[in-house]
Amino acid sequence: MWSKLTVNMKKLTVIKDKIDQDLAELGGRSLIAQYMIKRIPPQCDPLGSQNRVVICTGIFAGTKLTTAHRLSIGSKSPLTGGIKESNSGGNAAYQMANQGIKMIEVLDVPEESGLWILHIGADGNATLKDAAIYKGCNNYEFSESMKETYGDACAVISIGCAGERLYKNASIQITEFKSGHPSRAAARGGIAAVFGSKGLKAVVIEEPVKKFEVTYVDEDKFKKVCLQLNKVIAEGAKTDPFSIIGTAATTDISGASGILPVDNFSGKFFCDYEKVGAQAFLDKLKSGGGRNRIPCQPGCVVQCSNCYNDPNGNYITSGFEYETIALFGPNCHISDLDAIARMDRLCDDIGVDTMETANSIAVCMDAGKIEWGDIPAVMGLLNELKEGTEFGDLLGQGCEAVGLQLGCKRIPVVKHQSMAGYDPRNTKGTGITYATSPMGADHTAGLTMGRAFDDAGRTGQAYASNKLQVAMCFADSMMCLFAFAHTVPVLPLLGELMAALYGGTSEFTRVATIGVTTLLTERGYNQMAGMTAQDDRLPEFFYTDRSPATGSVFDINDLELEVLFDFG
Amino acid sequence: MWSKLTVNMKKLTVIKDKIDQDLAELGGRSLIAQYMIKRIPPQCDPLGSQNRVVICTGIFAGTKLTTAHRLSIGSKSPLTGGIKESNSGGNAAYQMANQGIKMIEVLDVPEESGLWILHIGADGNATLKDAAIYKGCNNYEFSESMKETYGDACAVISIGCAGERLYKNASIQITEFKSGHPSRAAARGGIAAVFGSKGLKAVVIEEPVKKFEVTYVDEDKFKKVCLQLNKVIAEGAKTDPFSIIGTAATTDISGASGILPVDNFSGKFFCDYEKVGAQAFLDKLKSGGGRNRIPCQPGCVVQCSNCYNDPNGNYITSGFEYETIALFGPNCHISDLDAIARMDRLCDDIGVDTMETANSIAVCMDAGKIEWGDIPAVMGLLNELKEGTEFGDLLGQGCEAVGLQLGCKRIPVVKHQSMAGYDPRNTKGTGITYATSPMGADHTAGLTMGRAFDDAGRTGQAYASNKLQVAMCFADSMMCLFAFAHTVPVLPLLGELMAALYGGTSEFTRVATIGVTTLLTERGYNQMAGMTAQDDRLPEFFYTDRSPATGSVFDINDLELEVLFDFG
């Protein structure tokens, strides 16, 4: 039986119990939706005593399914004011599963300010340890220190100075498998600020002496189907650009098609996109002695991660992704990959979302605060964020706050969260996802780019967005999206896997229902938090200002933005 | 605790037991979907031993919620070859609830041919009674005989000669509250033929001496919310044409807009539509001493039913509906309401679906078998159906079989089931419903006509269809659609009602999830039965032949027909 840890930050207690009955067969995003709708008041102050943090594994944690150890973190978002599930790779969900812990709920706020680490020892004992000495310690130094104390295998989920300062752009960083770099992030929505408000510096999980063993209703069947699925995914990965190159493979396609954001979502074409493209990325990796095809969690067959060094072979960053390249690169009119890698490293270190932060800086450029493409000025602003200067504190409030303060006309946000590396005028389905996802402008909620829906025009894009939004809800409950993508031809196997694990029907409907129910629940939560249909819209300039690269506007009307299953 | 009756037609036994755990909180269409996916093999012969019939009440049966006593009947359809839930008003679900019976499952087929009545006595005893003497007895005579034997309050669910002969257009007739006329029908999909294949002539339910009482988790809360909902519905009914006039109110709108089918879905305009319009209908009612505003089940505040007499005041038919008027009227080029009423009566008596039958006759006219608008010829064909002549047997196979046999170019069917009284070229959302509903061309699965989606063009129609298809799935699980329509501004109350009845969450998401899960399950069933995306298409002529009335074709492409949550 899976366990649950209840951490009360007011009482400073940790209680281990069995998992709640209503959550027992859920995991990841679906678990968080059902947890939150019942246990976190939608109207609560995100940084107050009523908000909670949930940290959990996916449905298939503890099994041999490839990428089954994605980590999900949920809370009412300080950035969007709505429901938030942010997930990440790394080794933390794997060590949670080894400990037999499916979820950790963090309640209340301390009576007096302080910092604590939730430590889960090799003996399975979970305690809150005083972490006052780590105040202001950023993620690279912190995770190094934890490894020294608890060994290389320990997993660290931590916040840097940004989370401690309750920045709305603050990210939670998770250590990567083997390297131990804190380079995987539950980045979006500022949940790190909720950690900060609770005085929770980190969760550190040692590898237990005795590993938890999953109980299956039909273990033989599970192993058989799991092997079949792993083979399909491994076969798909062989020709998958995300596996061969990494997510940086996206730059060439998005750059050539006008999807790549340029100069604060101006819709312009970026002539130098190949300078930050796949080949440049691979060349840099090679010349610096870095490498790609790194698994961020044990057992991953896609292995999209990487290790990026400077030309002298000194480590800069890892998990260096397309989103960061697009938004700190062309969207800030920058085409120097090494410089972007340093920005990525600094963001991971202080614990801020690279997307929210890069967008804030692009807005600064657009408003004339700094020059387009000025790399030292960008590093200067990131250092202000690190140091907590007055302007740094503003940057920490996210792109929208910065844009409003500076009087910028183009502020690319939905539900107060800024957009990922795709201009919605040129991938309209993704724009529909940005507009309608309960998560705010989030590409992982349903990225339609690259899907063959062009012949159906905007209608097909709406369908693609809607379908993908449901699919992502169940995918985010069980595995990494990049592995999930390869399961599409054999989706019914996911139903069989659930039946072999928990019993009950093996119909795929069971899986799809998890997706639909999750999305419905998330939308319901946001409504109760006060959001309306007007929160499901893009900023006006996408409707009115043509993309110079393609001549397109975002011409999706309000009805097309409606999602099938809203009945309110 | 609700009961279940298991009727085995091979063993000729009836066993009473408590309701299955997995179905306990379901009802109507949602119960049937979950029952069928687990218990009726999708590939089975609809008329063979493996098919079953499920007869059940809605989720709120036994309560005071208005229209809570809709009756659902499910089976693998002999007409469509897929899943089928057909529901009806009348007094049968009310008497089932009084008996404490939530569902009746009918298994297997008799070893030797014969006819039986499932009789549920005032003492609650359920037995199979030999009904050989009723062979060939049609519904009006049969229900009269049952009332004489078991009293006026008894409910009768019966088949006529058409069901006995296994006609695919055969309907199951249900007695109306008070009048006792067998004029309510579970009409579509030929489930009456499954009754016939099992030798089940009828289910007769007496009013029990001691009425079953529903157990509530929170009775006071239920009563409070229920009263609130009933008031909203009653208030809405005050200005509802379905209440003031009846479904015949539709004819004027559909006639004026080209939606009314004319001359076998030719798309023409019918100049005489007012002759079969609302005013003509009311005038006829008045002159014959008939009346409208009749509740078909106890406690209904909408009261859309009617009693239709001839000019001399002699009863012809009741529950005389728009669909019958449209399809036996303008679609057969007939504008004589009295004649159409006689056709309706004959269909109810022999137990055939008026829609399937009228469409078959329109196809006969189109192919030159009889003249357009020839009323005596229509009555002649209906009598052939009644007598079981060679051509009558063909008519009994439904519109598609007749059209193929006669070489008709226009055969208005989807999944082998013919269309209701709406031309899909001029109400495209309804066309999308016809195409994609798991039920075949069924207007009750999601009729978009009259909804303000015109400004969004075809895209808005697709959304309207999809939303409504989900909404109808949960509506068909708990109440009559005409009452449900008035609950739209207060939908969250349905969640509160469920929580007060069963406990658990009161979120509306719970209700919406029932809708989505049901539709997903139904689509999954049809896929396992062998249906593909090609079964989700309209006949070609709707795409190619312009409607002369409006110039429209059905220009919805295949992607727009895709329903959100198919991932196969």
Image (tube, coloured by chain):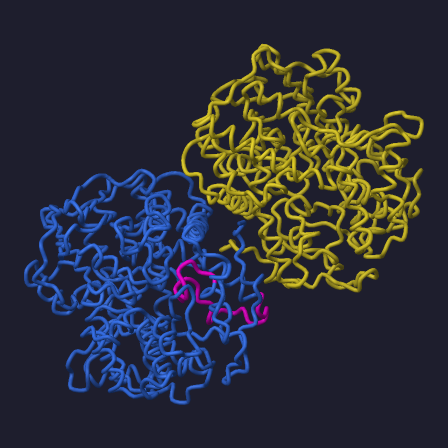
Chain colours: A yellow, B blue
Query: Which quadrant holds residue A228?
Result: top right
Q: Which residue is drawn at 42% across and 43% down?
A: B506
Q: Position of residue B225 (x, y in %)?
A: 35, 50
Query: Which quadrant holds residue A548?
Result: bottom right
In this picture, is A229 found above or below B408?
Answer: above
Segment tinted magenta in the rendering = B436-459
Q: Where is residue B187 in the image (x, y as percent from the top left)?
A: 29, 65
Q: Which residue is drawn at 14% across and 67% down?
A: B136
Query: Which quadrant holds residue B380?
Result: bottom left
Q: Does the magenta stretch include residue B444?
A: yes
Residue B263 is left or right of residue B137, and the answer is right
Residue B104 at least partly seen: no
Observer-nearest residue: B477 or A115? B477
Observer-nearest residue: A331 or B246? A331
Q: Position of residue B86 (x, y in %)?
A: 32, 59
Observer-nearest residue: A143 or A192? A143
Q: Which residue is drawn at 26% across and 41% down?
A: B19
Q: Position of residue B346 (x, y in %)?
A: 21, 75
Residue A326 at least partly seen: yes
Observer-nearest residue: B338 or B504? B338
Q: Is residue A263 magenta?
A: no
